[in-house]
Amino acid sequence: MPLSFYATQALHGLVYGMLLFLVASGLTLVFGMMRVLNIAHASFYMLGAYFAYSIVTATGSFWLALLVAPIAVGLIGAGVERFLLRQMRGGHVLELMLTFGLFYIVGEAVIWIWGSVAHQVPAPSPLSGSVPLFGAQYPVYRLFILGVSASICVALWLVLMGTRIGIIIRSAVSDGEMVSALGIDVSLVRMGVFGAGAGLAAFAGVIAAPFLQAEPMMDSAILIDAFAVVVVGGFGSIFGALVAAQLIALLQSFGILFVPELATVFEFILMTAVFILRPQGLFGETS
């Protein structure tokens, strides 16, 4: 096969990797700060796609959906943290059971409201064509996903590394008790991070909707990949989530190309190797 074919396949992997990063970045921050394995995080991703479908159907504006859906889902996420997770006093097992239950509740609610069939969200007309790339025509919308996801990644890094709220969030991830002792309301920070993580997942769902369709099982499809990113990259590490998302996406992209029947196995081989050689993840800190 020509080299351009492999370059195109790598680009496919990078596109999915950036989409996966948007979902996993919020998940890794939530786990790093709250030590909550939020199974329902994938549900926020699915809600973003379905909210986008409803908004685009009602208004015809994909850009309005890109603005409104993440905010709406982010508020839902903040409410889940404030009124449900914060009330759990029995430890992490009850928190895990709660988010697991929410995962199924949201899945059933989606089927009840939108039905069990997949819904296509049309891409905006400026992004619906293709451009010549690597000797073939490549969809403009996939390049849009890559570009906007990379922009969000840079913005997230700038916020976390260059602003006061970013310093507070990173400090709360490392030592929440010390941050609380300095007079900062850590519970409010946690609610904000949880809501922002849900909003990021919903943003990924919105931009994924024209690419992958809005369908009832899309939360399950990305859930394992998102947790694999958190495990491989390191709990609480945004840079680790970025690197791990790209590694896993490229493994899937080329695995499907060369060994399609074992494509998903490579992801678990990578996870197992990281567990054995570096249990805290590639860029996680030792406790």
Image (tube, rainbow, N blue to C red):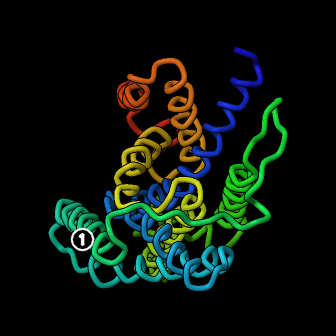
Which residue occupies the foreground of this view, 35 or 26? 26
Which residue is located at x 64 percent, y 38 percent?
A: 12
Residue 17 showing in the rendered view = yes
Residue appearing at x 67%, y 55% in the figure: 145
Q: Quadrant of the N terminus?
A: top right
Task: Report the residue that reaches farthest toward the top.
Answer: 1
- Residue 250 position in % (x across, y down): 58, 32
Query: Which residue is found at the position 52% from the left and 73% from the top?
Result: 53
Quarter location, residue 77: bottom left
Q: Give the amino acid type for the residue marked by disc 1 in the picture.
A: Ile
Judge from the rendering whether residue 174 lies leftward or rightward of residue 6; answer left or right.
left
Q: Nearer the viewer, residue 85 or 150?
A: 150
| Percent position of residue 151, x then y | 73, 59
With respect to residue 90, does 256 lie above or below? above
Closer to the camera in the image, 252 or 244:
252
Question: Does 137 appear above or below 265?
Answer: below
Kindly identify the residue that appears in the image at 63 percent across and 73 percent down: 66
Give the crowd class for mark 1: few <14, some 14-19, many >=20 residues within 10 Å: few
Q: Position of residue 118 (x, y in %)?
A: 42, 61
On screen, residue 158 versus residue 250, left or right, reads right
In this figure, which residue is indicated by the disc labeled 1? 105
| Image position, residue 203 (x, y; %) | 57, 67
Q: Toward which corner of the image does residue 141 lie, by quadrant?
A: bottom right
Q: Secondary structure at mark 1?
A: helix
For the question of whether residue 36 can be seen, the reply is no
